Amino acid sequence: MIKYLSTRGEAPPLSFTQALLTGLAPDGGLYLPDHYPHFTPETIKGFAGKPYAEVATQVIAPFVGDDLPLPILRDMIEAAYAGFRHPAVTPLSQIDSGTFLLELFHGPTLAFKDVAMQLLGRLMDHVLKERGARATIVGATSGDTGAAAIEAFRGLEQVDVFILYPHGRVSDVQRRQMTTVEDANIHAIALEGTFDDAQAILKGLFQNEALRQRLNLSGVNSINWARVVAQSVYYFTSAVVLGAPHRPVSYTVPTGNFGDILAGWIAKRMGLAIDRLVIATNANDILVRALAEGRYEVKGVQPTQSPSMDIQVSSNFERLLFEAYNRDASSLRRLMAQLGQSRGFTIDSGPLETIRAEFDAISVGEADTTAEITRIWRNAEMLIDPHTAVGMAAAHRHAKQHASTSPMVVLGTAHPAKFPDAMEAATGLRPPLPEHLAEIIKKPEHFTVLPNDQAAIESFLLDHARAARQA
Ligand SMILES: Cc1ncc(COP(=O)(O)O)c(C=O)c1O
Ligand SMILES: N[C@@H](CCOP(=O)(O)O)C(=O)O
């Protein structure tokens, strides 16, 4: 049975459902399994042609172990993906001879976050009901996690949801997806700061033990291990279409908080034949600098046309570092303390080489992102959103720099209709929102602007969370 350990090594190991409800470890670390399940090439080959939900059940079940009966887990997974607008859930389309687009935006909020969040909502609801418990979910978003979490948890009796987004730094569609929801358990908070500020406050809330206990705090960012494992599934479903396990496949992943690409790395640990993992960033290039120079150094967040990736402190990189340092939690405590004190740290040469052996990293500027949207529209008659365009441009550059025979899959992380201004600038077209979302443009918005101050957020939570009233 898998147990979950904190990257900082000072929190007790937990079971899957305990880690699910806990979110961030009390020592400030992120949970990881004590070992990874391993699939044989025959098992992976058997995933080909199976429905998405069936592969998801096979991939996720070993992480859950005895914590949930398998039929219940299977039912939740089937329900999670039944509402996706494409029967394949995450279909693959071909861009050119060696490049493929993995379309992750067919869920209810048009972003890859739905793939994990639709399941997470069901898992949490089930576990909370079983325990007769209530939770207060806090999330930080640069645009997409917030909408996906709100959609997954709206109207649930067991949970209140508080989403912090950077005021004025998300697209209009992203903001309206969060602020036009009427359900009483949903609270959108426009934070006067960046996504990094929101994520720092979020982590600070979890470290206030009294608040954590009183509100039964829980998190749905990729801090939560269940998010990451649910995102590993589409690496399996896409790789087998392209010939895995016998033919390795490479992935380029538009990256911010490092959750999505980490999910690919986890799939590789489970036996999937992945060749290169290419980190694609916008101008917020901390990971590119870290891989090139060995120095992880936070600079100011730059606003771009791919706002969901306007992130400097890339939370899940901590999980990769933990592995690259051979799970030495004391090294992680040292690095994270340096990050807190001086906004940076140096990655030691051994772990740096370990990371470079599997990852490449490429940053794509604003003009190249626009040019890529135009190029793909002209060559493939396909509209790709600015985040996906960062990935596509990075994959293109990677192909020029490295001779490789592996097919390259670019993760398509959001629907272009979420970013109509960027799309119009690049193609002259404003893709319409699907019918079920069209009404958000007219609906009244509800949000509260709060300062970039943890105490202000804490008092808002205490005033509005139902768990606080019951405590
Ligand atoms: C559209 C989109 N693309 C890419 C990313 C980056 O993903 P990750 O934070 O998992 O690196 C995000 C945010 O997470 C996003 O919303
Ligand atoms: N890009 C994300 C930022 C949060 O990422 P998460 O995967 O840790 O939830 C967003 O759109 O909110």
Image (cartoon, rainbow, N blue to C red):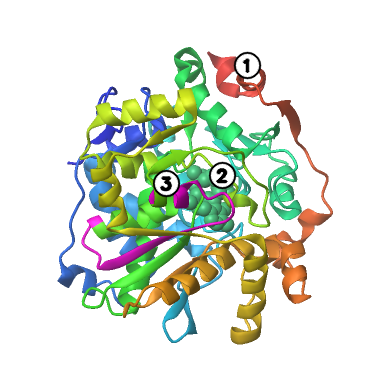
**Residue flagged by tag 2: what amino acid is it?**
Ile
Mark number, residue 290: 3
The residue under label 2 is 311
Residue 317 pos. (x, y %): 39, 43
Label 2 residue SS:
loop
Which one is earlier in the sequence, the residue at label 1 or at label 2? 2
Q: Is residue 171 left or right of residue 138?
A: right
Q: Crowding at label 1, few (<14), some or many (≥20) Cα neighbours within 10 Å? A: few
Which one is earlier in the sequence, the residue at label 3 or at label 1? 3
Does residue 108 sit above or below 91 in this rendering? above
**Residue flagged by tag 3: what amino acid is it?**
Ala
Report if residue 272 lies within the magenta region: yes
Viewer-proximal residue among 242 and 293? 293
**Cβ atoms under marks 1 and 2 closer than 8 Å:** no
The residue under label 1 is 455
Label 3 residue SS:
helix
Viewer-proximal residue among 393 and 1? 393
**Cβ atoms under marks 3 and 2 closer than 8 Å:** no
The stretch in magenta equals 269-291
Which mark is nearer the camera, 1 or 2? 2
Report if residue 48 lies within the magenta region: no
